[in-house]
Image (spheres, rainbow, N blue to C red):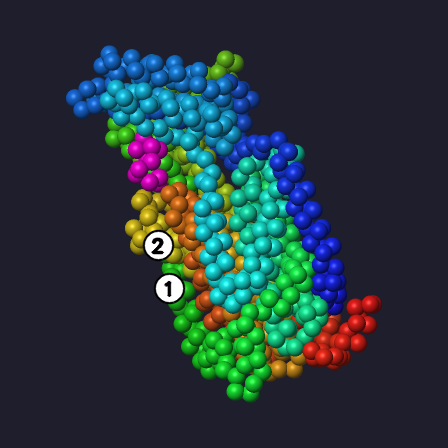
Amino acid sequence: MATFLYKLGRLTFRRRRFVALIWVALLAVAGIGAATAPAATSSSFSIPGTEAQRAFDLLEQRNPGTSADGATARVVFKAPEGEKVTDPANKSEITGIVKELETGSKQIASVADPFATQAVSQNGSTAYISVSYQVSSMELTDATRESLEDAGKDAQKSGMKVEIGGDALQVMPHTGTAEIIGVVIAAIVLVITFGSLVAAGLPLVTALVGVGIGVSTITALANVLDLGSTTSILAMMIGLAVGIDYALFIVSRYRAELAEGREREEAAGRAVGTAGSAVVFAGLTVVIALVGLAVVNIPMLTKMGFAAAGTVAIAVLIALTLVPAALGFAGKRVMGRKARKAAEAEKSPEAKPNMGTRWARFVLRKPVWVMLVGVLGLGVIAVPAASLEMGLPDDGAQPKSTTQRQAYDMLSDGFGPGFNGPLLVVVDTKNSSDGKAAADRVSEEIEAIGVGAVIPPAFNKAGDTATITVIPKDRPSSHATEEVVHSIRDAGADVKSDTGAEVLVTGATAMNIDFSQKMNDALLPYLALVVGLAFLLLMLVFRSILVPLKAALGFLLSVVAALGAVVAVFQWGWLGSLFGVEQTGPIMSMMPIFMVGVVFGLAMDYEVFLVTRMREAYVHGESPGQAIVTGFKHGARVVTAAAVIMMAVFSGFIGSSEQMIKMIGFSLAIAVFFDAFVVRMAIVPAVLALLGKKAWWLPRWLDRALPNVDVEGEKLQKQLTDEPGPEGGESGERELVRV
């Protein structure tokens, strides 16, 4: 592989105008396709195989007008001090808003008058209008949301307090500001790392080209493949991260080759042949992690994973072709004056070792202590992960300044916390001899469990399906409400055996519980798939069993430690005020798998780039200890820069007002910190130092069975018989390029 990539690097360097033209043309075609394609619609959210989804599907089939899985909203009214919502003036105002809402959008399925449905608190201070929509919250148009937000403005003028809750106002948060901050910080870090504006600009420009092509392609194909408007979010985040990383690796190796005295074209060929091999296999591990999201069996998540994997593949191709072409355009400006002086200083016998070299030598002197401190430190931080509770945040997790949170609090005060998350119990009486009796028995069983309220069964026109609304006593995301759902389902099993009627629990709260359970069940299979496949891939790269094993175990340690930190901050509330956590609660159920997929890809990037440099030095004759020092001498600065950039990008999301985005940003930033600086920079060299030559051991039969992909460029080095200096020694290499 190294030989092929070496030839590719030299070819793209020589044909740089043609290569640049191809990528610009692809960007233009993708951009035109995105601009002319129909606007992306948000695909409906479904969780195949869950009871809540089966109940939604049953209602859609038996009573399609109900739009059971559609978005909902509650317009909550609180009368001024000393007044009631039932006072004539206030009642007239609320009734007028009911009519206004009914005509406000074609997406509305029903609007419930609070005075007809008894949605008025006992003391008369609070009332709410229930609004149901025909489509999910992700499919609501901006016009529909605006009509909902405008509905209560007139009532506020009359003195009533009006707030709006429910999932109808939930929109995917705009993350443009965080991305801009991340790019700016990335630029600063790159300038510090390279000491050259040209060298710093190359990874940014090429990464943005890759993200532009990837996201534009997703947008262009959104309607054809039913991708939805949320699909590009993960692709943009990961594409930007790996795009900068991969270009950074190539540019860094190119500068190192120039510092060795190579001609520019030769340096480009060697950079792509060596660092490019690491990029290919690092990219493959990321693709495995993202495509592996399909095991969760949630269509939206699967599409996001595949789309992001495609963007990563584009980032790899750009690193192997557009980056060396851009290096050809950059000329000698890619080496800043400080870099040239540093290169000259390194050639002198009394050259001062860099920070990476000094750290590696320290680890070699104290490998046991470094390993123990790293493992025990992460182990202590991981302890809270044992108390991990997964769920989906409700409006109670919103900032107190938002209308959703204020509506949530008003409903809790006026009616009780359970009114914020009613359960919908569906009774399928088709196979029951007495459907009404079966539905009544279900109501009695639910009342016996102990809930806030049970609204009597309502049958469809055919009389074969009944719906019962249940109001729990506690808030939607509480453990007590989850127990109520399980208790109703347990009671339903007895009802089915006695009457033949099937009982299904659904609604937004039950859907969240089922979603969390599905994500929890998928976590271990997903980890096994991703880590297992990556282990095989890394065994192919490093020709070793212990190095991939160490890489996988180190990753698991950093992920569990990151989960522990997330639980401590967002579930227990430790240092919560520092990160703007206003309401503690369960950890978002998608977050662990999402974090595993993203961080695994980035962690393997750092592992492959750092350890491949060590493997390369070892194969070329250095001792195991000296190979570790060489790997850190050339790779530590680059890996540190890449990790700092990623932490900066992810930390930008911690400032979001959305609890979900805040949690994702924190978890990814802290996981990258643990993996890059504790695992890869400390534990990995310590373990390799203790293993010595055994680290690179591979059974002979396995060595013969595995194809030799020559990531470290051993075969390439043999073919390049002479080390080229600035003056000559290139005749053999020119012959090689002609092959």
Residue 537 sits in which quadrant?
bottom right
Q: Which amino acid does label 1 sit on?
A: Val
Q: In which quarter of the image is the C terminus?
A: bottom right
Amino acid type, label 2: Ala
- In screen coordinates, is 166 left or right of 630? left
Residue occupied by mark 2: 568
| Left or right: 381 as drawn, with respect to 416 | right
Image position, residue 727 (x, y; %): 72, 79
Give the residue at x 25% y 23%.
Answer: 160
Q: Would residue 10 be found to the left or right of residue 122 on screen?
A: right
- The residue singled out by tag 1 in the image is 380
- Looking at the image, tell me whether mark 1 or mark 2 is earlier in sequence order: 1
**Which of 76/391 is in front?**
76
> In the displayed structure, does residue 606 sit left or right of residue 25?
left
Q: Which residue lies furthest to the left in this view?
A: 82
Q: Identify the residue at image location x=61%, y=75%.
A: 259
- Residue 665 visible in this rendered orientation of the protein: no
